[in-house]
Amino acid sequence: MKQYIVIGCGRFGASVATTMHILGHQVMAIDKSEDIIQNIADKVTHAAIVDVTDELSLRSLGLGNFDVAIIAIGSDIRASIMATLIAKEMGVGQIVCKAKDELQAKVLYKIGADRVVFPERDMGVRVAHNLVSDNILDHIELDPEYSIVEIVTPSGWVGKTLIELDLRARYEITVLAIKSGKSINVTPSPGEELKSGSILVVIGENSKISQIGSENKDLIRRK
């Protein structure tokens, strides 16, 4: 299981951290604010008060041992840059950064960010779901328990029909549409045979959708 660290736990960072923890992942949250850490401590695996510009403090946390670092600092550009540089130097496998504008994004990419997100465009919950599942392409939260998502058809489902898979019984999800290339079928029949590379638009409980990703993450990779 991947290890995640969220650096900066304002609204965006807290949303990412708590959602990933709900999905069953190991998450460490750090922030320089004692109040913020107190509020999030019971919603993540570990939480610590840390000045993210202090390299020694980040090293003491074992930053290099984390697979993914989400640097959710937008307003303090210096802190954002420093945290990104330190994470890169310490060998974090994937670095995802928050940015407030395109200029900050360009700087972050140049110093090692693998992905930059804008809170106005990418809500924290959506980012979290995309990070922890290789099949999930997009995620729209309807409420805290239910969502509509796009998933790549798992290889184990290819060649089978919807009625054979019986997804409602197995996962309590409903297939709303099937996308193949540029075409989309918004009224898929029970006898619809799934093809490799097709995308399913499904609605269901978040925990059930997460289960699909966990069971099939070694079978298919996101393109």
Image (cartoon, helix red, strand yellow):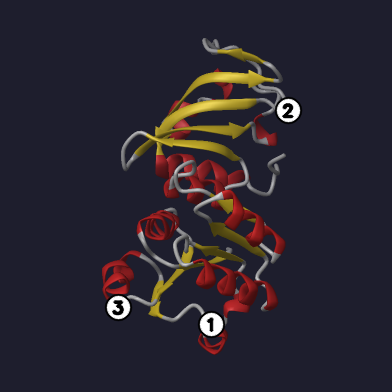
Residue plotted at (55% across, 52% down): 132
Cα distance in 3D space between marks 2 and 3: 49 Å
Q: Which quadrant is home to the C terminus?
A: top right
* Residue identifier under label 3: 34
Is residue 183 shown to the viewer in this render?
A: yes
Q: Which amino acid, by three-letter code, is at mark 2?
A: Ser
Q: Secondary structure at mark 3?
A: helix
Camera-side mark, 1 or 2:
1
Is residue 161 shown to the viewer in this render?
A: no
Residue plotted at (54% across, 10% down): 189
Above or below — where is 24 with respect to 125? Answer: below
Q: Which comes sooner in the sequence, label 1 or label 2? A: 1
Image location (x, y in percent) of residue 167: 50, 28
Q: Nearer the viewer, residue 7 or 66?
A: 7
Q: Secondary structure at mark 1?
A: helix
Image location (x, y in percent) of residue 216: 62, 44
- The residue sitting at the front extreme is 103
Residue plotted at (47% across, 60% down): 74
In the image, taking residue 190 as reference, residue 193 lies left or right, namely: right
Camera-side mark, 2 or 3:
3
Q: Secondary structure at mark 2?
A: loop
Q: Which comes sooner in the sequence, label 2 or label 3? A: 3
- The numbered mark at residue 196 is 2
Q: Which amino acid, by three-letter code, is at mark 1?
A: Leu
Image location (x, y in percent) of residue 89: 69, 77
Q: Which amino acid, by three-letter code, is at mark 3?
A: Glu
- The numbered mark at residue 107 is none
Mark 3 crowd level (few <14, some 14–19, many ≥20, 10 Å Cα): few
* Residue identifier under label 1: 58
Kindly indicate the quadrant of the structure image that contains residue 12: bottom left
Q: Which quadrant is home to the N terminus?
A: bottom right
Cα distance in 3D space between marks 1 and 2: 43 Å
